[in-house]
Image (tube, rainbow, N blue to C red):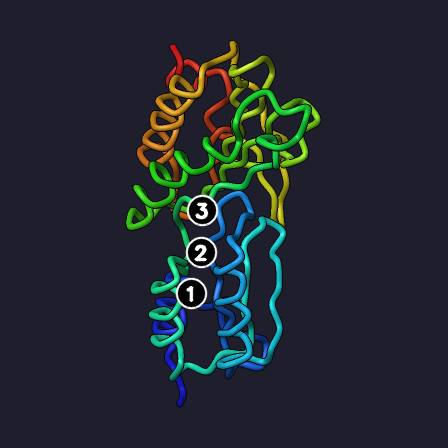
Amino acid sequence: MELSNDQIKALKGKGYILNKDDVHFSCRIVTPSGRLKAGEAKKITEISEKYGQGDIYLTQRMQIEIPGLKYEDLDQVTKELADAGLAVGGTGNRVRPITSCKGTLCRFGLFDTFELTAKLNERFYQGHYHEILPAKLRISITGCPHNCSVTHMACIGLMGKKTDQVAIILGGMDGNEQSTGQELRGLYTVDQAMEIMEKIISYYREHSLPGERLGKMVSRIGFAAVEEAVIG
């Protein structure tokens, strides 16, 4: 079955990415903090063997992809994953699933990164998922200044600096073009940081140009002006 470009684009927005062979698709499964329960991992393996080619890939941002899926099986794959409590998505011009380190378990972690990732995913990924932005927006959190999640390369980054206090990093960018984000002045509680992140996303939506990454917008407007707008 030959699909139109609009159909392929719509499928990508749902988390199904066309493979290089222009026939099969990869299913991107959202795994907050890169964590899976044993039963979830078994279900992913089962679906890979049943509908795919028996392969499972980890993305750079700790999501899981099952390649080699046929178009006619995608609806059933979505249903079976949903029945197991797993969601497909994480692509397109929107807030992407949040990436974090294992600071909850790591002895260097200054706050519970797993708990925060769950809150951020609910509020910003799930809460904003149907809101199309000018470009993708990536959020990354790290539990300490070791910065294992490379927060300075995310559109918005949170870094643990003191126990239960985080720095907010703004304007990083990866991809074909890269830029290093800068820290907003001050340290914040997690609740304060989430409110500022909401302001950042609203500012980005209102002041960016079509197709413009947040880092590009910050560079165009100026870091100091954006900082003043989101924290005063």
Relative depth, front residue between 66 and 18: 66
SS at mark 3 in the image: loop
Task: Say left or right for 159 vs 70.
Answer: right
Q: Please provide percent x and percent y for residue 145.
A: 67, 22
Look at label 3 and name its amino acid. Answer: Arg
Is label 2 in contact with label 1 (beta carbons under 8 Å)? yes
- Asked whether disc 2 touches disc 3, contact meaning CB atoms under 8 Å apart, the reply is yes
Element on which disc 1 rests: helix
Answer left or right for 150 relative to 133.
right
Residue sticking out furthest to the right: 146
Q: Amino acid at mark 1?
A: Lys
**Rendered residue at 48%/46% (across/down):** 32
Label ID, residue 91: 2
Name the mark on residue 96: 3
Q: Quadrant of residue 57?
A: bottom right
Where the C terminus falls, by quadrant? top left
Residue at position x 46%, y 46% in the image: 97
The residue under the point 51% across, 74% down is: 46
Task: Work out whether mark 2 precedes mark 3 in sequence or the reverse, and give the earlier one.
Answer: 2
Number of numbered discs overlaid on the protein picture: 3
Question: Looking at the rendering, which quadrant does residue 227 occupy?
Answer: top left
Q: Does 168 sit above or below residue 77?
A: above
